[in-house]
Amino acid sequence: MREDDVAAVNDVAIAAFADLARRDGHPPPLPEPLDAAYVRLRRLLDSDPGGCWVADGRDGTLAGAALALVREGVWGLSLLVVRPEAQSRRLGSALLERALAYGDGARGGIILASSDPRAQHVYGRAGFALHRTSVATGSPRGVAAAPAVRPFTDADHQMAARVDRAVRGAAHGADLDALAEAGCERLAYPGRGYAIHRDGAVKVVAAADDEAAAALLRTVLARMPSAAEAAIEWLTPAQQWAIEVAHDAGLDIRPYGGLFLRGETGPFRPYLPGGAYL
């Protein structure tokens, strides 16, 4: 992947996820703001150029892309998309092979999968264990912010790294700054955890204990704009603290996608990952 591929990769992602939603019987998802999407793609191209691959189609236009990252020995798949008309031709598998090769020698691996059974099959064949996930959506009701939660500052990076290593085996590092650059709000529970969201769409919640994690998630929901809808993704059965918060807020929970893990990734709780940086 090169810098001049950024816009085309984003276009392919929008088309692929809109097609998947149509096949699942759902309306197309609202794409990220363009500036935010470009920050994500450029961040990975800058930090992990060896994990960023694209494929040209028969007509010369970009047909697919795979973006992977490695943080402190843990590999993650940030994006794997193929234009709808180019799917089922093993193009996605070929892109995934390049992305996986970038993680050769990694002690752990993380994939956040859509509901596409073809992709889930490929991830399972690659040695990743499936953990079924759900998504909680809707307009939260009766949620109060936790008094102990405050805005995240640069001084919180050390705490965030310690918590990340405990729950997922590796720190996010400057990925947290990239999320802020992309317009997300960062919150901290001093000494115990942090959360990142954009208008109620949860990007990351990581904490040293369930109580702090729940306080952070409630604060995210309480700080949402009144017209916005919450989206809490990648809820596994192990994240009962988050499921309880979602139920208390009156959100709807339905099965969607899957979390695939391989190797050393920590307990993965209390933790809600995000698609961009896992």
Image (cartoon, grey):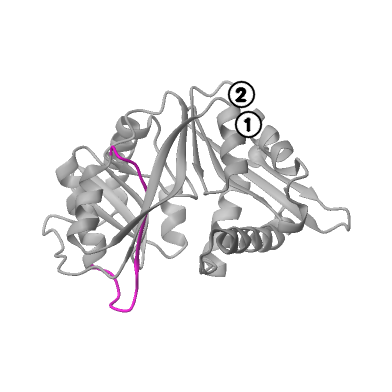
Question: Residue 107's spot in the image, x, y percent?
Answer: 49, 22
Q: Residue furthest bottom?
A: 227
Residue type (three-letter) at the residue carrying disc 2: Asp
Q: What residue did someone put label 1 on?
A: 100
Q: Is residue 278 visible?
A: no
- Residue 224 position (above or below residue 259): below
Residue type (three-letter) at the residue carrying disc 1: Leu
Q: Residue furthest right?
A: 59
Picture quarter containing residue 84? bottom right
Picture quarter containing residue 141? bottom left
Q: What residue did someone put label 2 on?
A: 104
- The residue stretch that appears in magenta: 223-238
Q: Residue at x 51, y 44 (%)?
A: 113
**Residue 123 inside the magenta-drawn segment:** no
**Residue 230 inside the magenta-drawn segment:** yes
Q: Residue at x 16, y 63 (%)?
A: 145
Q: CA distance from mark 2 to mark 1?
A: 7 Å
Question: Residue 49's spot in the image, x, y percent?
Answer: 65, 41
Question: Residue 83's spot in the image, x, y percent?
Answer: 72, 56
